[in-house]
Amino acid sequence: MSTADWVKVAVEGLVVIGFIAIGVRTGGIGLGLWGGVGTLVLVFGFGLDPGEPPVSAMLIIIAVIAAAAAMEAAGGIDYMVLVATKALRARPSALNFVAPYISYVLTILTGTSNTFFSIIPVINEVAYKNKIRPERALAGSTVASAVGITSSPVAAAMATLLPLVEVYHYDLVDVMLITIPASIVGIFLMSLVMSRHGRELEDDAEYQRRLAAGEVQPPAEAADIELKPYAKRSVAIFLTAVLAICVFGFVEDIRPTVAAEGGGVEPLSVTPIIQMFMLTAAALIVLLCRVKAAEIPGMPIFRSGMVAMIALFGIAWMADTFIANNEDAIVHALGSLASEWPFMIAIAIFLVAGLTTSQSAATRTMVPIGLALGIGAGYMIAMWTAVVGVLFLPANGTQIAAAEADTTGTTNLGKRVVDHSFQLPLQIVWLVTALVGILIVWLFFGGHTPAPSVPTTTTTTP
C-alpha cells in the first residue's frame, strides 16, 4: 500500500473513533444513532462499500427480549429475585462469595444484568447488618453480573458472537463449555481477594466519619415481593426454552437438516433455533400466564433491550464497513503484533468494551479482527470474555446503583475516573477468566481452529 492509502485508512479509522466518542457522550440509543451517521460518512464521504449489519444477532436480541419482557410482565423476574434474596440471607457469613455467584446466575438465566439492580439493596442490607464491608460484596457482585453475559445463551453479546464462530464449527454449547468454567474460576479468585480487600467496616475511616456526622442510614430490610399468580409458570416456560436451546445446541443429530451451501444437507444452525424458541416462549407466556401482549413493550427489560439492539446496529455496521473495506491493511498492520502477542486482542476487546460501554459492539468490532489475524476461534472465545471491560469506566448503571446504595462510603466511583471500587475485581476477573479459558481450549478443544464451513475472506492458522 502507498503512503496515501495508509493515510486514507488512518483517517477513516479516526472517523470511526470520533463517532463512537460522540455516541458515548450522547449515551443510550445515541451510540447506535451516531454509528449510523458514521456509516453514512464512510460510504458517501470515503466511497466505501457498506458493511453487513449484524442481522442474525439483532433478530436474536429481539426474540430474547420479547420472551424476557413477557416473563417480567407475568412476574417471573420478581420470582427470580425472591429466590435470590432468600439465598443471600441464608448464609450471611459467606456473602462475599455467595452474592457474586447469585448475580452471575441471574444474568445467565435472563441474558441481562438488569436483574442485578433488584438485589443490590438486599446485598447492601445483609452486608451492613452483619458488619461486612459492603464494598466487598457489592463491587464483586457488580462485576460478576457483567461476567454472566459471556455465559448466557440468551445474552445479546452471545448472539453477536455466535454467527462469527459458527463457521469455524464452534456452537453455543462449545462457547459455554469454555466461558462458564473459566468464569466460575475467575469469580472465585476475585471473591477470595475481595473478601480480604480494604479495612473491616468498623475500622474504616470514611465510615466512621460518616457515622459521626450522621450521614449513614442503616438500610431498611427489603420488603417482601408480592408475586403475581403465574410468576412461577412464566419462569418455568422461559427456562424450559433456554434448556431446549442448550440441548439442541449440544446434540446436533436431533436438529432439523437444511440445505448446505456446497450441496447436501447439514444440521440447522443454533442461531435460528434460539430465535424460534424464544418467540415461542413469549407466545406461551402470553397464552398461559394471562399476559397482555400490549404490556410487553412497556417492560424495563424490553426498553433496555431495544436500546442495546439499536446501539449494536449502528456501531457494528460502522465498524464492519471500516473493517471489511480495509481488512488487508488491518491484518498487515497488526499481523506481526498478533503473532508475537496474541493476548493483545483480549486487551483490545477490553478497552473497546470500556469505551463503547457495549459488550455487543465490542464483540462485533474486535472478534472479526482477531479471526482475520489468524487467532484460533476457540482462543478468541476465551479472550472474548474481556467484554466485561464495560465496567472499566464508572459509567455503567449497575456501578452507579451499587455505589449509591452503600451509604457507608466503602463502595465509590473514584476521584480519578479509573480508581473506583470495581476496578480491582474487574481486573482480576477478566484476566483470570480469559487465561483459564485459553487453558480450557488448549486442553479440550485441541487448540486449533477448523477451516470455515463457508467461503470467507478471513485467514486461519492450522
Image (spheres, rainbow, N blue to C red):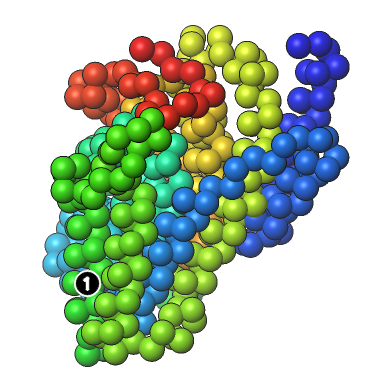
Q: Nearer the viewer, residue 236 or 241?
A: 241
Residue at x 38% of width, y 30% of height: 262
Looking at the rendered image, the quarter that the C terminus falls into is top left
Q: Is residue 257 above or below residue 452?
A: below
How many numbered marks does the figure carry? 1
Residue 339: x, y in percent?
A: 48, 11
User: Amino acid under label 1?
Assistant: Ile
Indicate the quadrant where residue 64 lies: bottom left
Q: Nearer the viewer, residue 209 or 261?
A: 261
Looking at the rendered image, the quarter that the N terminus falls into is top right
Q: Is residue 243 left or right of residue 121?
A: left
Q: Is residue 78 above or below residue 254?
A: below
Residue at x 78% of width, y 18% of height: 6
Q: Nearer the viewer, residue 451 or 391?
A: 451
Among all residues in the image, which is located at the extreme front? 263
Residue 7: x, y in percent?
A: 82, 21
Identify the residue position indicated by label 1 in the image: 237
Q: Is residue 197 left or right of residue 367?
A: left
